[in-house]
Amino acid sequence: MVKYKEFKLGDLFEIQKVKGINKSKLVNPNISTNEYDYVTRTSLNNGIESTTDFVCDVPYNEPNTFSLGLLQMTFFYRERSWYAGQFVRKIIPKFKLNTKIALYFNTIFSRLSKVLLSVLVRHVDNVFRDSKVRLPVTDADEIDFNYMEQYIAELEQQRLAELEQQRLAELDSYLKATGLNDYGLTDEDKKILAYKPIFQEFKIVDLFNVVNTHSILKSQVANLENGNVPYLTAAEGNNAVLKYINCPKEWIDEGNCVFIGGKTMVVTYQEKDFCSNDSHNLALYFKDSRYKSPLIQQYFVGSVRKALSKKYSWDDSISKAKIRSDSVRLPVVSNTKNLDFNYMEKYIRTIEKLTIAEAVKYKDREILTTESLINKM
């Protein structure tokens, strides 16, 4: 059974004022190689508002200490050297500290937040020093730091197991919902990847009806939040969706199309009806209904991007007029001019499997990395 004893925080820690600096004094802020954290009163991101290189003429605070933000009275363990903004205290242990012991004490400190919020700021230091906490002790009535480390290690392993189970459950649910739970390559899939199709050039306007989308400014949709219509831009990532809005019917463009971000040549497949921003965007709608399956349209997305991405730029953007002279190379059935829809669909299904397999491997690597880091702590 664990034995506990009360200790006065002032006997275990020193609490000190630190020299605060303004953000304008930071050197090369938010660079990945920065060695110093810039800690403010925020309760977010472990109290870190930014990072910085060495700041001349300002003493930095040593690592393996704690910061206390006086706005919300939040404590954070400081594993790295750090600078501080205004109204931040430094708490220095009078014993050897490591990450696991720090996490144990951080939990104890968090219980003091309500107490410190109830007193004037000028009294915070004394209230902290006079506060008493119950800590595990050995048979000799000395603080049992080994117990603290083992306790935190067990919690971390338990949390890691929970995260792993959650990850597996979420991934399994997603794969089942999308029909991609079977992502192992079959012999047929391998043949598709090895197959060398015959390609022919096709005029884009012979395949598509090309439409200028609506040109809706960001300022026009600023107050149309909490809807289910995707608001598209020419930005790369997230399938060109900036956000979802409550869009007026007169602004909506029909989905099930290939969408081109005119200024950037970002090409995506849009399954749902959407609202488009003012980036000279185009929507391509297939003339033949046989082309309209999502898998075939995704194949066309890649083909259009490959054919046109190097031709157009921000300064010379694509347009409804210019695209009339453009062509795209597409696979055809041997000895015919007929598009090979069967190959397109099978090829995209195989690529989907490869993508999901890579996503699963990535998540597995994340779990292994997290577990490795925890075991080293």
Image (spheres, rainbow, N blue to C red):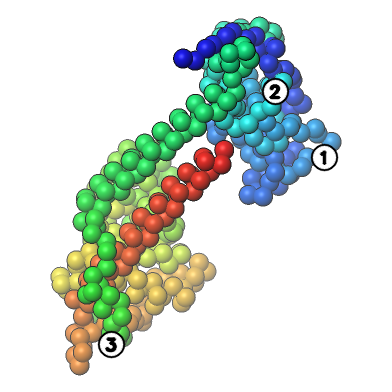
What crowding class fits label 3: few (fewer than 14 Cα within 10 Å), some (14-19), or many (20 or more)?
Answer: some
User: Could you tell me which secondary element the residue under label 3 belongs to?
Assistant: strand
Q: Which residue is mark 2?
A: 95
Pointer 1 with pointer 3, Cβ within 8 A: no
Q: Earlier in the sequence, mark 2 or mark 3?
A: 2
User: Could you tell me which secondary element the residue under label 1 belongs to?
Assistant: loop
**Depth-wise, is mark 1 or mark 2 nearer the camera?**
2
Q: Which residue is mark 3?
A: 198
Q: Residue at x 39, y 71 (%)?
A: 305
Q: Which residue is mark 1?
A: 56
Q: Amino acid at mark 2?
A: Phe
Q: Earlier in the sequence, mark 1 or mark 2?
A: 1
- Taking the view exactly as shown, the residue that stands out farthest to the right is 57
Q: Is residue 34 above or below residue 271?
A: above
Instruction: Estimate the spatial distance between the alpha carbons at disc 1 and disc 2, rounded to whole Å.
Output: 30 Å
Pointer 1 with pointer 2, Cβ within 8 A: no
User: Could you tell me which secondary element the residue under label 2 belongs to?
Assistant: loop
Q: Is residue 223 above or below residue 10?
A: below
Q: Quadrant of the C terminus?
A: top right
Q: Residue 46: image x %, image y %? A: 57, 32
Q: How many marks?
A: 3
Q: Amino acid at mark 3?
A: Ile
